[in-house]
Structures are given as C-alpha cells and as structure tokens.
C-alpha cells in the first residue's frame, strides 16, 4: 500500500487512448478520475490507519500494561503489524461456530476431587441470600480487570473486551483455555459474562468488602473478579492459570505432557537413589522476601538444603538444557516457596514424588486447596525457615517410609489433576457462576476463536497452543461434591 503513485492510478484509464491524441474532454475526465482515486485512497488509508491504531489484540497491541502491576511492555508490540492485524481480524478468521453434537454421556461421571468444593466457597458472597451477581457488580470489578470475557450463543462463541495488556502471552493462552473448554464440552459451557485480571496478586480485599462477608455489615456483595489465585483475605475467584496450556516464555510445555515427562523422570530415580537434602531451584528476584530469605538456608551440612538460582535469560540462551523439570526429581525433599504471588511451580514440584516442603503459603490457586499438611506435603515455617527445613529433612530421614508416602500422595494429587479435571473445574465454576448472574450476558467488542488466536501467535506459541488442543469429552464431567448448604 505504500507504493502508490498517481501514474499507477491513471494506468487503468489509459486503455483505449493509443491510436490518436486524446481530446481535451477525455484528458479532463482522466485527471478527475486520477484525482478521485487519490482522494479515495487517502480516505481509505486514513480509515485503515485509524482502525490499526485502535486495534487491540490479546498480545497487548495498543494496550498499556495494567496500572496496578506495571511491567516492561515491548514498544514494538504496542501496535500490531498491519498485515497480522488485518489477517487475524476476527471478522476474517472466525467462522460461525460449528454445531457439534453434545459430548457423549456414555460413562457416568466420576466424583470430582474434594477441592472442587472450593468453587462454592469462592462464590459464597454472591450465593448468600440469593443476591447473585448484578451488572453493577461486574462494572465495579472492571476497575481491576484486564479484560471482560463473554461466552454467548449457547456456549459456542467467545468475545473479549481488552482494557490492559497482560504480561507475556497470558491473555492469549487464557483465551485459548476457554476456547478449549468450549471444544471439550460443545454446547455445555454456560453463557456468562465475567471480569478477568491476568496479573498476579488478588485485589478484592475481604476487609474492605466486609458487608458481603456475611458478617452482618449490611453492604452489598463484592465485585466478582476472576484471576489465577486468591488468599483467605480476598474475594478474588481462582481460575486455572495459563501454564496448563503451556508457558512458551520459559519453555514449559502443556501440563499433560509436562506431567508425563516429570513422572517418567521421577520413576528413573528411586527414593534410595535420591539425595537426602531439600532442593529448590528458582528465580529469587521476583520481589519475594521469602525467596530472598531462602538463599540464606543454602547449606547442606547445617540445614540439609540446596538452593539454586534459576536465570531464565541464561536458560533461554542455552536452550533450557539445565531447566528441564523432568531431570529435577533428584532429591528426596523439594522446597516450594511462593514468588510475587502463587507460583506455577507447585504442580511440577509435587509431580516428582519427593516430599514437598511448602513454606507457609499465603496464596491459593484452584487446586492447592487439595493440599493437606503431613498427608501430601510437609509444612515449613517462614519464621525460623532454615531450622524448619532442617527439622523436616531430619524427620524424613528418621521416617523414610512415611516421608516417601507423603511424596507419593503429593504426586497422586497431581496425577488426578489431569486436563480432564482442569476442564471440569472450569466447567463447574462457570456453571455455578452463571446460575448467580442476574443479567443476560452480552457479546463484548471482539470475537475470539481458535483461528484468530493461532493467527496472532508466533511460531513457538503456536506449537504450544496446538499441543494443548482439547478433544471433545467422551464422558460426563465429574460430579460435584454434595453442597454443604453454605
Ligand atoms: C444420555 O443422557 C440422556 C439424558 O440424560 C439420556 O436420555 C440418554 O439415554 C443418555 N445416553 C447414553 C448413551 O447414556
Ligand atoms: C485490606 O484492607 C485493610 C483495610 O484497608 C488493610 O488493613 C489490610 O491490610 C488489607 N488486606 C490485604 C490482604 O491487603
Ligand atoms: C548454594 O550453594 C552451592 C554450593 O555451595 C552453590 O553452587 C550455589 O551457587 C549456591 N546457591 C546460590 C543461590 O548462591
């Protein structure tokens, strides 16, 4: 489009004028035609430029980082490359969704893992007194949301309205996760409208919304905000994080593949063969005082602990050879330390079958509510941390069978957390949330479909996305634990 010249525009009108000198009237007509073409082109181009400068995408084009958690946002990515933006426009890449047959119900659903009960606890503020979720509450949640997500058309269409950029490819992978849920359960995902923040820390403080806490404060229910984690002091609603579908920036594969590899790596190393110390490898530079304090426990003699620094930039340069999770099941004890908030590493640590030493966790993601102290992990205290690690290792060495059993039960928790369970959690959460909605979901600005997500993705992202594609369910979703009537 940059190569436009008036000669080219005039080219079309030259057709019949070879033989004789064109009359003046014809010259005037061609001039007007050429001039009009220039004007039309200029108008089109400016409309196009205008559309491009307003086009937001799941990769964060034309979006500022979230003000509540700023991050370096590649300036080149502020604006989509025009070709990509045009090519990936949902109006071009999203076909009307196919009407697929509903998932077969040949098999009676298994019972959901116990931590699915947390869905009702998370939604309790809106269940109380039948108050539900109103559009006003949703608008209140918008203040802290990176995007509005709408599922319409009988669970077949996904729309997003983007407010802020999310770090890395989180928004892209989260939209993909919802599309895969829709693919797994055709026509069974409820129509919903919800606010989502894809940054780390919870925002809806329980104290500030005490009225909705059932404490008799008399206030309304809190704004409903979905994100990847929550705490006991927040009302944020946890939703599975992007890493289950893959984390290309750290080369972490989709969860089903990653778990299979780690389990295989774990099998290759018996309990007797594993080193009798507590091991941690991670990034201590994530504004986490806990991880900084952990560095001081790096002494195998005094604290039986080995603390290693993971430098993602260097790992990327060396092709991630030293960060393979499947070759990190070499120690009997593996430490889990939260980062800036919850850490996606929890599931990889538990998968090893080593006894997980979990340091006073503050954050909860959807499945960590299945953790039970001394049953499937060993609690370690943040105060007197090194002593606490040492004591845990000494206990384990004195009770090897029990320590191994704790590790095995942790691994079992992860084995049961297969992608079937992840999708079932999403389905049940959205279904329970949809029941509480007191308004009709409306499609948001931008349709998102598999083709538009894949189109936006770079080569590596696309590989991860394709590897994590779901297949339609062949059995019923798991059955929720009975409602305890809260
Ligand atoms: C599936 O469920 C429907 C309604 O619950 C029932 O009518 C149908 O027979 C079931 N099909 C199978 C294969 O179990
Ligand atoms: C919630 O708000 C209260 C009062 O503003 C404050 O004291 C408390 O530290 C906050 N809690 C969290 C977890 O941010
Ligand atoms: C911990 O100690 C080991 C062995 O002395 C060392 O190789 C490693 O770099 C130390 N870790 C950190 C984070 O300094």
Image (cartoon, grey):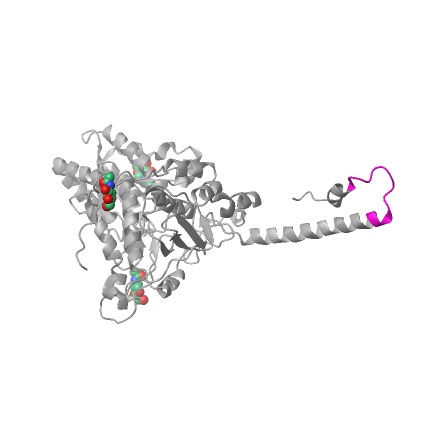
Q: Is residue 262 above or below residue 445?
A: above
Magenta-tinted stretch: 14-26
Which secondary structure is most common in the magenta stretch? loop
Query: 248 or 57: nearer the eye?
Result: 57
Percent coordinates x, y for residue 2 in the rendering: 66, 44
Residue 74 horizontal/vertical position (percent): 50, 47
Residue at x-position 22% and y-position 39%: 107
Quadrant of the rendering where the C terminus is positioned: bottom left
Image coordinates of residue 57 in percent, x first then y, are 48, 49
Left-right relation of 79 to 272 = right
Quarter of the image for the N terminus: give it: top right
Q: Residue at x 38, y 45 (%)?
A: 179
91 within the magenta span: no
Percent coordinates x, y for residue 447 in the rendering: 45, 50
Judged left or right of residue 52, residue 328 is: left
**429 is higher (above) or lower (below) than 98:** below
> For the view shown, which residue lies furthest in the bottom direction?
218
Q: Nearer the viewer, residue 157 or 243?
A: 157
Residue 383 seen: no
Does 16 lie within the magenta span?
yes
The quarter of the picture where residue 323 lies is top left
Query: With 263 as the anchor, is 286 left or right in this view?
Result: right
The answer to which of 353 and 414 lies nearer the viewer is 414
Instruction: Describe residue 345's horizontal placement relative to residue 482 as left or right.
Output: right
Q: Specify the quarter for ligand 2.
A: bottom left
Up/down of 297 relative to 443, above or below: above
Report if residue 451 is visible in the image: yes
């Amino acid at each position: 489009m940059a190569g436009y010249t008036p000669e080219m525009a005039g080219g079309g009108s030259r057709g019949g004028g070879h033989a004789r000198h064109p009359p003046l009237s014809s010259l005037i007509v061609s001039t007007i035609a050429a001039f009009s073409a220039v004007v039309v082109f200029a108008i089109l181009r400016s409309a196009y430029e205008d559309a491009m400068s307003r086009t937001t995408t799941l990769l964060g084009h034309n979006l500022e980082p979230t003000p509540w958690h700023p991050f370096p946002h590649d300036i080149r990515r502020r604006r989509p490359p025009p070709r990509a933006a045009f090519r990936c426009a949902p109006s071009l890449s999203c076909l009307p969704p196919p009407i697929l047959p509903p998932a077969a119900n040949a098999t009676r659903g298994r019972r959901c893992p116990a931590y699915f009960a947390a869905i009702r606890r998370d939604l309790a503020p809106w269940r109380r007194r039948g108050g539900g979720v109103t559009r006003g509450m949703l608008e209140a949640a918008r203040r802290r949301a990176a995007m509005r997500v709408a599922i319409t058309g009988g669970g077949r269409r996904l729309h997003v309205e983007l407010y802020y950029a999310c770090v890395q490819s989180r928004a892209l992978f989260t939209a993909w996760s919802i599309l895969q849920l829709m693919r797994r359960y055709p026509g069974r995902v409820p129509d919903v409208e919800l606010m989502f923040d894809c940054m780390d820390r919870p925002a809806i403080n329980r104290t500030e919304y005490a009225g909705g806490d059932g404490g008799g404060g008399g206030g309304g229910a809190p704004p409903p905000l979905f994100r990847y984690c929550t705490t006991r002091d927040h009302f944020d609603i946890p939703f599975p994080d992007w890493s289950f579908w893959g984390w290309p920036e750290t080369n972490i594969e989709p969860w089903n593949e990653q778990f299979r590899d780690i389990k295989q790596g774990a099998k290759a190393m018996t309990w007797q063969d594993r080193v009798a110390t507590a091991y941690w490898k991670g990034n201590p530079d994530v504004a986490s005082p806990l991880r900084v304090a952990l560095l001081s426990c790096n002494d195998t003699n005094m604290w039986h602990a080995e603390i290693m620094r993971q430098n993602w930039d260097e790992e990327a340069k060396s092709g991630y050879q030293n960060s393979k999770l499947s070759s990190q099941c070499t120690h009997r004890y593996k430490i889990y330390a939260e980062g800036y908030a919850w850490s996606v590493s929890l599931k990889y640590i538990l998968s090893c079958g080593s006894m997980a030493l979990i340091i006073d966790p503050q954050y909860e993601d959807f499945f960590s509510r299945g953790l039970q102290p001394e049953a499937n992990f060993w609690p370690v205290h943040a105060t007197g941390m090194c002593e606490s690690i040492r004591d845990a290792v000494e206990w384990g060495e004195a009770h090897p069978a029990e320590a191994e059993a704790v590790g095995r039960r942790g691994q079992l928790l992860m084995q049961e957390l297969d992608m079937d369970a992840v999708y079932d959690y999403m389905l049940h959460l959205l279904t329970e949330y949809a029941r509480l909605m007191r308004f009709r979901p409306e499609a948001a600005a931008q349709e998102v479909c598999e083709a538009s997500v894949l189109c936006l993705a770079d080569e590596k992202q696309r590989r991860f996305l394709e590897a994590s594609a779901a297949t339609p369910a062949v059995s019923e979703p798991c059955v929720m634990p009975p409602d305890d009537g809260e």
